[in-house]
Amino acid sequence: MALEVEVIKASRKISDRNAGKLSDVLRVAPYARVSTDTEEQLNSYKSQVAYYTDLVSKRSDWVLVDIYADEAITGTQVTKREDFQRMINDCMDGKIDMIITKSISRFARNTLDTLKYVRMLKEKNIAVFFEDENINTLTMDGELLLVILSSVAQQEVENISANVKKGLKMKMKRGELVGFQSCLGYDYDVNTKKISVNQEEAEIVRYIFERYTSGIGAYVIAKELTEAGHKTKYGRVEWQDTTVLGIIKNEKYKGDLLQGKTFTVDPISKRRLDNYGEEDQFYVKNHHEPIVSEEVFEKAQDILHRRGENRRRGAKGKRDKYSRKFAFSSKLECAFCGSNLSRRNWHSGTPHEKVIWQCVTATKKGKKYCSRSKALEEKLIEGAFVESYKLVCRNNSDVLDELMKRMESVFSDQNNQKRLNKIISDIQATEQKRCKLIDLCLDEKIDRAT
């Protein structure tokens, strides 16, 4: 018996479906965005809002849910666009059937974000209509065209970013001030693009340099400024030692200007890194009125460098991690407050240098928090330990015998050296493997994840 197959022609589109029900009216949400807060762009923003309000009102099969719009927000990062995120949340809650936007670049200038949100909405049967490209994501055949056009939008951002960076570098090369960050002691004039000395704040800067060059540390200076009630540039009353050190290192206080201290890795993530030579830097001497003399500034740098020399490791000087490398580390306790004692150097680099152990509470928070604590010389602590050990072991031959047995067993155990040699060999083999993997990655024979 021959089979007869009747073809029932499709009579509607998937975009007509709304939560499993047929709907004659689409709930529409227009999305508008402008990149900057200039008057021209804000006028464009208002025009977009008016345009979409009029557009939706003319269609009997459309009903306006809300107009979602972001002002003066970058299009490269959707997480920073509050109204965009509100619109997506409303879509996920089933309040919207279709999003209308002027172009792909208005929706997102990042290819990955464009596809991510289009696919997310497509799963909910929510259409995105791009007017300029005339694309409806629910009716289009495949994603190829969308990928191509969104890639073009992303490339446009990268080209604009490259041109902007080039223009900024040309300004820096001419000695112009670019992207000045707020700086204690100086005021910035937006119209003239120049900085001038703020005499009231400048006194604080001079005080910091005066105290630092006289031998006082950044922590103590910060504590003095806090107690005196002086405010930072950002209005904070409590000063930190890092804030003081930042002022000590800032070349602007001697009248010079270094530009290009940081750089943007890419225009999409907008991640910034300290510039260790990856990008050009521009140093301008005698750019503005100094607050301290060059002699005072350089003296402060010498002190800063000398103090950091002992704990500097590598080209950029990262501090060594705490390693309990001293005999009494974490073993001495303050009898008054219970805090640990830390090892410190007094009069470092002078004939009067000596090593002491001092209460951490008193050194970090101030003497008033542990007023009775005193600094103890390491030699005295070592002598006291030896005397205590003698008292313990003087009439206890069994203690000494046990100690000697343990020492003999440790020193006579040749396996320790063998184990050490094996571990060293394993480390060398692992390092060779790591170097080979790096070479393969550089030659693009394996990817980074592998």
Image: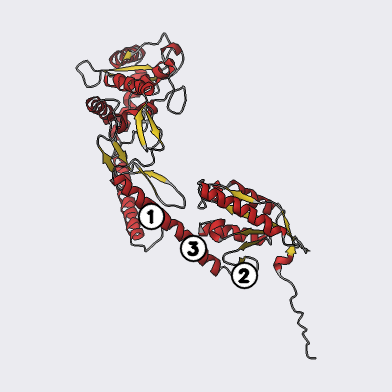
On residue 151, the disc is: 3
**Location of residue 196 (image quadrant):** top left
Give the Cα distance between marks 2 and 3: 17 Å
Say if residue 448 shows up in the picture: no
Q: Are marks 3 and 1 in contact (CB under 8 Å)?
A: no
What distance separates the C-alpha of mark 3 from that of mark 1? 18 Å
Image quadrant where one finds the N terminus? bottom right
Q: Residue at x 64, y 59 (%)?
A: 100
* Residue carrying label 1: 163
Q: Amino acid at mark 2?
A: Met
> Tag 1: residue type?
Asn
- Quarter of the image containing the C terminus? bottom left
Q: Mark 2 near mark 3, Cβ–Cβ under 8 Å?
A: no
Q: Which percent across, then down, holds residue 213?
A: 27, 21
Query: Is 126 above or below relative to 299?
Result: below
Q: Residue at x 28, y 46 (%)?
A: 173
In the rendered image, residue 398, in percent from the top left (x then y), is placed at 36, 19
Q: Is residue 201 above or below residue 414?
A: above
Q: Which is more toward the observer, 92 or 396?
A: 92
Question: Which element carries disc 1, helix, strand or loop?
Answer: helix
Q: Identify which residue is drawn at 72% across, 58% down.
A: 57
The three-letter code of the residue at mark 3 reads Ser
Is tag 2's residue or tag 3's residue first in the polypeptide sequence?
A: 2
Percent position of residue 236, x then y: 47, 25
**Label 1 to label 2: alpha-carbon separation:** 34 Å
Using residue 356 as the reference point, say whether residue 35 is left or right of it. right
Label located before the other in sequence (1 or 2): 2
SS category of the residue bearing label 2: loop
Q: Is residue 186 visible?
A: yes
Within the image, what quadrant is residue 120 found in?
bottom right
Residue denoted by label 2: 140
Question: Image check: 52 left or right of 431?
Answer: right
